Amino acid sequence: MIQIKKILSSKYMVTLVWVLGLILIWELGATVIEGTKRSPENVLPHLHQILASVFTTNKVNGTQTAFQIVLSNGGITLLRAGIGFVIGAGLGFLLALIMNLFLPIEKILFPYLMMIQMIPILGMAPIVLAITKDINKSRIIIAAILTFYPVATNTLAGFKSVEKEKHELMYSLAASKFEIYRKLLIPSSLPYFFTGLKISAPMAITAAILVDTLQGGAGLGTVLSQSLKHATTIYIFWQIVFLSAIIGILSFYLMVLLEQAISPYKRKKKK
Amino acid sequence: MVNVVNFEEEFKERDASLPRETEIIIENLSVNFPDKDGGEPIVALSNVNLEIKQGEFISLLGPSGCGKTTLLRTIADLQEKSSGTISVRGLSPREIRLQKKYGIVFQSPVLYEWRSVRRNVCMPMELLGMPKKDRTKRVTKMLELVGLMEFGEKYPHELSGGMQQRVNIARALAIRPEILLMDEPFSALDEFTKEKLHEDLLRIWQRTNKTILFVTHNIQEAVFLSDRVVVLSPHPGRVSAIVDIDLPRPRPIQMKETQEFNALVSKVRNSFEGV
């Protein structure tokens, strides 16, 4: 009995129940739609149909299967999102540092940062495209812009959350400003920095896919819109839905792993 | 700048027969805090005079609002004085701070949670620019001193409150400060841990021959630990008495049950004014 209780209360159990619940609802929906719609795969296909489309060897465009198309375009999108994410994270951290060093800069810049954040991506994308005149660059820049804000604000909050006593300890040891940043502020803001990264990693990927849809070329979003316009099989769309969800979740956990690798005390805290 | 690590010299037993030099001289010290609403400034300390000898264990004792912490912070150069003079070894508190001659122990351990115990103790030595080899040796020595040899690789959150405070003390002592400033270091600990740390602190003090300024609101604690107890009274913060504690050393915990001890506790208690 106790054993069963233990299993039921473990966090894997919660995940399992969630996944099973989702599958159940999905399949129920698919069954209903199968009986009522003329082309149910456009609305909600069965999961096994999607799975079958992943493993099928039928070529969709003469050379590639649906899954091969999704994977190759997924790689391209992921690369763009990744480059944008790294640039955005780097700039976000740097800006937080500058804002913390110079209060006037924080006062001047912060409202603009918030404004940039409030413009919808789909509104911002054409502007960026008009400026850069290159869709691939724009895709990277948009991913960077989206990453930038959560990282900058969280890191800045991290700098500001350092307790007074820790500052006083450094002061009493006559530490230089550089030493204070290197030994106190930067290490203690890292958890905040990673919070920013965890928020923005899935966002960067979503943004990259969204911006893909604006123009042709390669990328998940491009094939996604082709699929929706029935230029290719609709199952490409469904595969992308699942793949992007999986990538989004994985990108979050990648940040968790990265944080644990950089801050060993976090790893121990978990236990 | 780099301190030469010489444990033998540092840890020589206290020789009571040696004459002690005056280390800290405080004359007519006043500290005012400006009133937020622009009214009369609040007098935190008024006209404090105090001389402290090298190697003395001094307690600053009083209720909250008596300025004991303010006095410590002013000596530490964490607080500006309003008038009067403080001279530490002939220099100003700021000069002593810039020479990294103060070891400070706050009430909360203020450990860096991302650093292991060893690296926490190591931190001030990094600021001092000590070579790595010396740092490693010294960290080991410090951990031995506070009895945390097996806990070097642990992180602060894995330690009890008492152990964290030991790390705090080890870190403060790591750079061989001339003066150890302790601001209610044990007031958040339970009674048993506190007694153990009292014994340990006295042992460490005996071995290292540091001047210790110890802020507390606990009369028994002040009497048990100190050579002299500086009694501060509030409104305005001022020194109302300085009581010599002539109990013999070393002081075992049982001393707290003796008549002499209790007589001194009463004497200290009776020297408060306006509480």
Image (cartoon, rainbow, N blue to C red):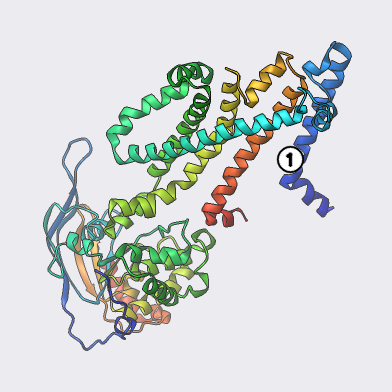
Which of A134 and A156 lies nearest the eye of the viewer? A134
Image spot of residue A2 (x, y percent): 81, 54
Whether residue A138 is visible to the viewer of this picture, yes or no, is yes
- Residue at 60% x, 30% y: name it: A77
Return the x and y of residue B170 as percentages of the image width and height.
39, 69
Task: Between residue B138 and residue A233, name the one nearer to us.
Answer: A233
Above or below residue A96? Residue B181 is below
Which residue is painted at 18% across and 52% down in the image?
B80
Q: Could you tell whether B269 is left or right of B153 in the image? A: left
Which image quadrant is residue A78 in?
A: top right
Location of mark 1 (residue): A15
Q: Position of residue A148 (x, y in %)?
A: 46, 33
Label 1 marks a residue whose chain is A
- Figure check: B89 above or below B73: below
Q: Quadrant of the C terminus of chain A?
A: bottom right
Would residue B168 be seen by someone viewing this image from the given angle? no
Left or right: B164 as drawn, with respect to B30:
right
For the point 33% across and 33% down, the residue is A106
Left or right of residue B120, residue B60 in this image: left
Apparent side of residue A114 relative to residue A18 in the rendered image (left or right):
left
Bin the neighbour count of mark 1 within 10 Å (Cα to Cα): few under 14, some 14-19, many 20 and up: few
Q: Residue furthest bottom?
A: B17
What kind of element bears circle 1? helix
Above or below, comparing residue A218 to residue A98 in the picture: above
Which residue lies at the image location 49% right of the left edge and 60% below the top edge? B156
User: For the residue marked with disc 1, what is the amino acid?
Assistant: Thr
Q: Position of residue A199 (x, y in %)?
A: 54, 35
Residue B145, compared with residue A189, is above or below; it is below
Q: Nearer the viewer, residue A77 or B72?
A: A77
Quadrant of residue B99 in the image?
Answer: bottom left
Q: Nearer the viewer, residue B31 or B109?
A: B109
Q: Residue furthest front?
A: A62
